[in-house]
């Protein structure tokens, strides 16, 4: 096969990039390791920044999101029983959209089907070659046969465990990492949301988040030690722990409904630089991971896609290489600010095992500052709704 851009990975980064390039008349081939059913069954992010909302509309996949998503004007943060409301709309004029990553991915698959894009599922042993030649190629195995896609550019959209980042020689790559000593146990449950907006709760028992997908579907999380296994968490144990961490007025409303999905995700901050190596670009989780506390993972993938699609359109349509040359620097400037915000939200809102009393006082002071200073609330709101791109 021959194409203009070979895209590795059919998660949100790969599908959105492919869709936007196809809309501009650029040909793509997408190579995905898993089955389509597996990609569509993963429960992940739930909050879209408005920039992401607008990019999805530009890609022609905004209709169901606009009909079924829920714009939110703010969120709540709590520290024990004290609650502070962050009103994004008043503080920044902007909102966020509650619309699950699972739905975004389904909409993108449907749009790509309509576009007639080749998405190859079940590829194994992907190898990327000739990144410093005029033409590059990607090799893979499908049904026991070795195949090849020749292309001008490669987009590495294959997540944290993918092959693209590892194709960059170690002496060229610089990695930055912070691993947190806890994970998030998440459940999906068919019960109405506990409040009109999300609640990020901290207490002496640890962190909890009350999120939602629709009027009768919630996504809730509790901070758990990294060593915990999902089998150790019955629904009853989850809800009991969740209630302890929510402010009392919310905890009193909890109905212990059965879970329909339950999983544990570790928390990590990670960046690999540069994002460009010859004809290859890293996009989304293949280059960076944020802890979910700031709801930035999927949104950072979208801003990377925005920069890269503009760069590739200029290169392939007009022969203007300035965008592809500048992609890494441009995307990283925004990535690092989202890294800082996600790290700060994580350290402020979680309990660290064996933390000293000074750390606790710092957390209480940060919370008190948010309660009493509109400037502090505006700073949080500006980062949460997403920095411009
Ligand atoms: P994805 O979604 O991981 O997609 C990458 C795709 O590449 C495929 N792949 C390969 N294909 C071919 N060859 C290979 N060698 C391959 N290796 C991998 C994979 O099968 C997959 O389909 O990355 P992408 O597209 O960059 O999208 C990023 C987002 O998915 C991610 O940032 C967020 O979901 C992060 N994240 C969360 N973010 C939030 O904002 N809120 C959340 O609640 C939240 N929960 C999560 C998450 C990420 C998780 N992961 C990655 C473990 C929960 C989990 C469990
Ligand atoms: C979610 O709904 O899954 C969700 C929402 C906000 C976050 C993380 C996850 O910060």
Image (tube, rainbow, N blue to C red):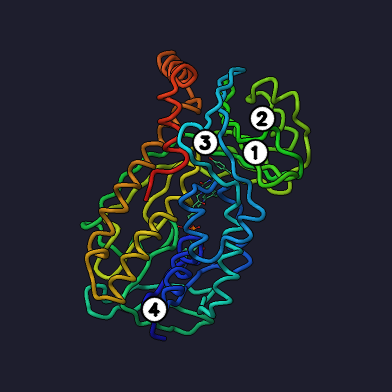
**Between disc 1 and disc 3, whose residue precedes?**
3
Q: Which residue is mark 3?
A: 89
Q: Pointer 3: residues within 10 angstroms few (<14), some, or many (20+)?
A: some
Q: Which residue is mark 1?
A: 220
Q: Residue at x 32, y 53 (%)?
A: 331
Q: Which residue is mark 4?
A: 139
Q: CA distance from mark 3 to mark 2?
A: 28 Å
Rendering quadrant holding ligand 2 = top right
Q: Which one is in front in this view, the residue at disc 3 or the one at disc 2?
A: 3
Q: Is residue 240 left or right of residue 273?
A: right
The quadrant of the picture occupied by the N terminus is bottom left
Question: Pointer 1 and pointer 4: residues touching (CB < 8 Å)?
Answer: no
Q: Pointer 4: residues within 10 angstroms few (<14), some, or many (20+)?
A: some
Q: Which one is in front in this view, the residue at disc 4 or the one at disc 3?
A: 3
Question: Pointer 2 and pointer 4: residues touching (CB < 8 Å)?
Answer: no
**Between disc 1 and disc 4, whose residue precedes?**
4
Q: Which mark is residue 270?
A: none
Q: CA distance from mark 2 to mark 4?
A: 47 Å
Decide: is 155 above or below 89. Answer: below
Q: Which residue is mark 2?
A: 242
């Amino acid at each position: 096969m021959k194409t203009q851009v070979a895209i590795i990975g059919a998660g949100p980064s790969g599908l959105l990039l492919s869709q936007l390039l196809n809309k501009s008349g650029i040909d793509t081939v997408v190579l995905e390791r898993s089955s389509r059913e597996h990609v569509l069954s993963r429960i992940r992010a739930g909050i879209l920044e408005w920039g992401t909302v607008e990019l999805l509309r530009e890609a022609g996949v905004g209709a169901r999101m606009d009909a079924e998503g829920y714009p939110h004007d703010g969120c709540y943060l709590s520290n024990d029983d004290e609650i502070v409301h962050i009103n994004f709309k008043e503080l920044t004029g902007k909102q966020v959209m509650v619309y699950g990553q699972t739905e975004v991915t389904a909409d993108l698959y449907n749009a790509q089907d309509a576009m007639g894009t080749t998405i190859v599922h079940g590829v194994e042993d992907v190898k990327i070659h000739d990144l410093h030649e005029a033409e590059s190629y990607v090799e893979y195995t499908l049904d026991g046969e070795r195949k090849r896609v020749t292309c001008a550019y490669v987009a590495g959209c294959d997540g944290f465990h993918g092959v693209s980042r590892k194709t960059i020689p170690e002496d060229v790559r610089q990695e930055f990492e912070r691993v947190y000593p806890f994970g998030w146990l998440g459940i999906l449950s068919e019960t109405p949301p506990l409040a009109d907006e999300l609640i990020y709760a901290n207490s002496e028992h640890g962190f909890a988040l009350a999120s939602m997908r629709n009027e009768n579907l919630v996504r809730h999380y509790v901070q758990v030690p990294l060593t915990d296994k999902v089998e150790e968490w019955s629904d009853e144990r989850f809800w009991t722990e969740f209630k302890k961490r929510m402010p009392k007025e919310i905890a009193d409303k909890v109905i212990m409904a059965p879970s329909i999905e339950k999983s544990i995700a570790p928390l990590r901050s990670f960046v690999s630089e540069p994002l460009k190596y010859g004809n290859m670009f890293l996009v989304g989780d293949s280059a960076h991971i944020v802890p979910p506390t700031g709801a930035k993972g999927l949104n950072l993938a979208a801003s990377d896609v925005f920069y890269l699609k503009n760069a590739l359109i200029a290169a392939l349509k007009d022969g203007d290489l300035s965008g592809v040359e500048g992609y890494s620097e441009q995307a990283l400037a925004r990535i690092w600010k989202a890294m800082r915000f996600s790290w700060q939200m994580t350290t402020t809102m979680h309990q660290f095992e064996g933390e000293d009393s000074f750390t606790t006082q710092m957390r209480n002071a940060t919370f008190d500052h948010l309660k009493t200073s509109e400037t502090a609330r505006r700073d949080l709101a500006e980062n949460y709704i997403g920095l411009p791109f």
